[in-house]
Image (tube, rainbow, N blue to C red):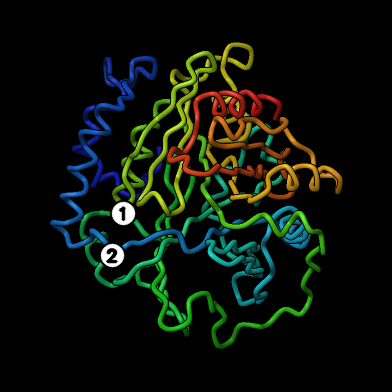
Amino acid sequence: MRDSICDAVLEDHLVSVDPIEEGGIPDLNRFRNSDEFLRKVTPEIVEERKAYGLEGIVKGLDSVVINTSPEHLLPAVSELLGNTGLHCRAAYENDHFRTYVLGVEGSADLLIRSRLRGKNPFLEFNNNPKSGHVPQSRLETFTFLSSDIDRYFEVQTERGVRFMTDEIVRGDNYSFIQTVPSRYTGNSIGIIQWHQNRGELISEGDTIIDEVPQKPDWPHLLDISYLDHCATRVEAKDRDPAILEFMEVTNYDFDFAIYVRMMNSITNVARVSRDDFAMVFTSGISPFRSIERSGPTEKFIHNYGRRVHHMAFQTENIENTFYGLKEHGQGFLLDLVGSPEDGLKQTFTTQSATTLLVNEYIHRYGDFDGFFTKSNVTSLTEATGKQ
């Protein structure tokens, strides 16, 4: 198996969760995932971050990068303009990418782009039975804000974290570094420090793109606001390593897990604070057996690979959003689930043909201080079986 982001950093922690080996061959049926272990190791990782001077220099989510093939780029942008509150803030091209920057106030940006040349380092994660026909389509990178990227890069490089470039990339208005893709998630973690104006990505030599799809003037889109969380599907055996790896390269911590045993699924949440974007990891409890015997989560991974399954957007009036989107042709995997009494409502769209992503719309009511409810998680997990 390929090297991952920080194998050397995780080596000591993973002794407790790696598959038990018999005769030098990992027995994937005898691995151990443990909430108790994650709760025990979380404060240890926090203390490590403090000792290395890393605690606090990585903040919340700045942006996500979604890649498509060139022929899918404009359809993907148009689709997101038509089913979210996002607006196109900028569009530009350079030697490497053609990029559309979508944003809405109070939210991380979405960078929808296509590679123009060079090797795609994520390609090996996209070759699965239901994803191989669009090998360039993927949410690839989560980029987090930093107050001291030079310190971060120096320390993490010394610790053995692997980056795509040997040096920090310096733009006119930003400094940026990006890890190699994780072997557990297929995701990369970016770190960005803005020099002056946050969000201004265009540098000297970039070409402004004039062809920008129109944002539909639909009232229900005004209720859709910030990116609340994203959920990555990981294999059962990789659940703990994936969460630990993410904690090692960000300032996020494991918060809680919800088990849906009847569907062989665990939904895990990592947060930097209750008010910031949350990262969700969903895995099986036991490994994939067969299409007939495995639950929706493991079947999704078998069909599409380790990848981000959905992006969740906070929605002020979720009924108007749901019915307005349906009126304009958006398909859904299920009806609205939850209620004001439960504390929240949610739903999933059908999968995008251009990005392979599902959109979730979520509304939390009043003084609800939770994040999910088990009943909603169960319904949403079941719905992914339709993909």
Q: In the structure shown, which secondary structural element does the residue marked by tag 1 occupy?
A: loop
Residue sitting at 23 percent across and 47 percent down? Answer: 9
Note whether 44 is above or below 85 in the view shown: above
The disc at residue 347 is none
Q: CA distance from mark 1 to mark 2?
A: 8 Å
- The relative height of residue 168 versus residue 337 in the rendered view (above or below) is below
Q: Amino acid at mark 2?
A: Ile
- Quarter containing the C terminus: top right
Quadrant where the N terminus lies?
A: top left
Residue drawn at (82%, 64%), measured in percent from left and top? 217
Outermost residue on the bottom side: it is 204
Q: Is residue 220 above or below residue 30?
A: below
Q: Position of residue 35 (x, y in %)?
A: 31, 27
To which residue does mark 2 refer? Answer: 57
Looking at the image, do the residues carrying marks 1 and 2 touch, with CB atoms under 8 Å apart?
Answer: yes
- Between residue 276 and residue 121, name the one nearer to us: 276
Q: Position of residue 306 (x, y in %)?
A: 52, 37
Front residue of 344 and 377: 344
Helix, strand or loop at label 2? It is: loop
Which of the two discs, 1 and 2, labels the residue nearer the N terminus?
2
Label 1 crowding class (10 Å Cα cut-off): few <14, some 14-19, many 20+? many
Q: Residue at x 60, y 43 (%)?
A: 362
The image position of residue 46, as x and y in percent, is 21, 49
Left or right for 305, reference 367 = right
Q: Nearer the viewer, residue 292 or 270?
A: 270
The circle on residue 251 is: 1
Q: Residues within 10 Å of mark 2 (few under 14, many from 20)?
A: some
Report the amino acid beneath label 1. Asn
Quarter-wise, where is residue 207 in the image?
bottom right
